[in-house]
Amino acid sequence: MVIDKIKKRNVDNGQVKSKVDIPIGKWVKCDKCKEILYKENLHKNFGVCPKCNNNFRLSSRRRIEQIIDEGTFKEFNLKIETTNPINFPGYKEKLKALKAKTNIDEAVKCGIGEINSEKVVICVMDGNFVMGSMGSVVGEKITYSIEKAIKLKLPIIIFCVSGGARMQEGIISLMQMAKTSAAVAKLHKAGNLYISVLTDPTYGGVTASFAMLGDIILAEPGARIGFAGPSVIKQTISQELPEGFQTAEFMLEKGFVDKIVERKEMKDILYKLILLNK
């Protein structure tokens, strides 16, 4: 939770009022341990709380900065825009407001870059844009990136964060599950390496499609992974769920995840996996 405003204390004892010089928007509060953290220190620590090791959600831009060699990322320019295919009320206005707020056009950023000088195709989903939900443009960008990886004979890495399919686009959003899964099948047939990295949260149609189809599936500590949320499942089956249900650690124990990787180690682990599969 970002502390957008910190009140400046005023002292009025008949003399000149004094102000505490605390810059607005420079501090964040950890949702887990409630510690107040200086933003710059948090960024230097890869967006991980130094007190409780809680992983803050990262923007696609910051994630790329952490993973891709400086100056090597080139974003794919597909020149496609999200539309409102079922005329969902307020959808256009919401998209316009989010674009202005986040300075990104959609919930995924895709392109080519280098990891320790090894070329890769990379897609990074962004939870700041409609909670990383997958609509027609997200599905097209993912599919295009997979096909580009096949054409260039490069490994592909997809960082997933999503609440699922974007229901403001109705059945068209659900069709992206089949579309991206078919692209991954082509990728496997071509023999390209596909590494999927699951971050918090990865749910719904993204989990039910490309997120769980990687040759290697990595996850960040504590990431929540599943199709439906725990409360929905609990109501559906009318049973208590196991402790830690749907966390990355639980998924690792059950064999759905290959390895849990700390953010500070992620780039090196990806680099080693790429070398092992050359």
Image: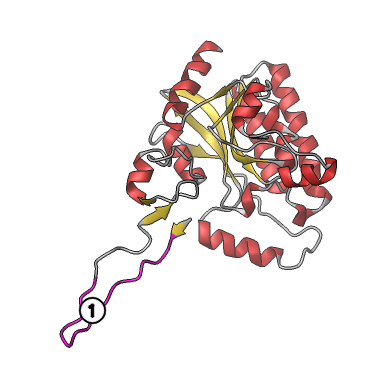
Quarter of the view holding residue 246: top right
Residue in front for this viewpoint, 46 or 31: 31
Quarter of the view holding residue 95: bottom right
Residue shown at 28% from the left, 73% from the top: 9
Start-end of magenta stretch: 3-19
User: Mark 1: which amino acid?
Assistant: Val
| Residue lying farthest to the bottom in this orientation | 14
SS label for mark 1? loop
Q: Is residue 53 above or below residue 273?
A: below
Residue in front for this viewpoint, 156 or 190: 156
Q: Can the viewer see residue 49 in this picture?
A: yes
Residue 229 placed where, x, y %?
A: 72, 44
Q: Can the viewer see residue 278 in this picture?
A: no
120 in the magenta segment: no
Residue 219 placed where, x, y %?
A: 57, 30
Instruction: Give left or right: position of 27 versus 130.
Output: left
Residue 269 placed where, x, y %?
A: 48, 21
Residue in front for this viewpoint, 38 or 157: 38
- Provide the major secondary structure of the magenta segment: loop
Residue for badge 1: 11
Q: Is residue 270 above or below residue 137?
A: above
Residue shown at 67% from the left, 32% from the top: 211
Q: Is residue 128 above or below residue 60?
A: below
Instruction: Give left or right: position of 42 versus 20.
Output: right
Residue in front for this viewpoint, 19 or 204: 19
Q: How many marks?
A: 1
| Residue lying farthest to the front in this orientation | 240
Residue shown at 58% from the left, 53% from the top: 105
Identify the image quadrant of the C terminus: top right
Residue 202 placed where, x, y %?
A: 65, 39
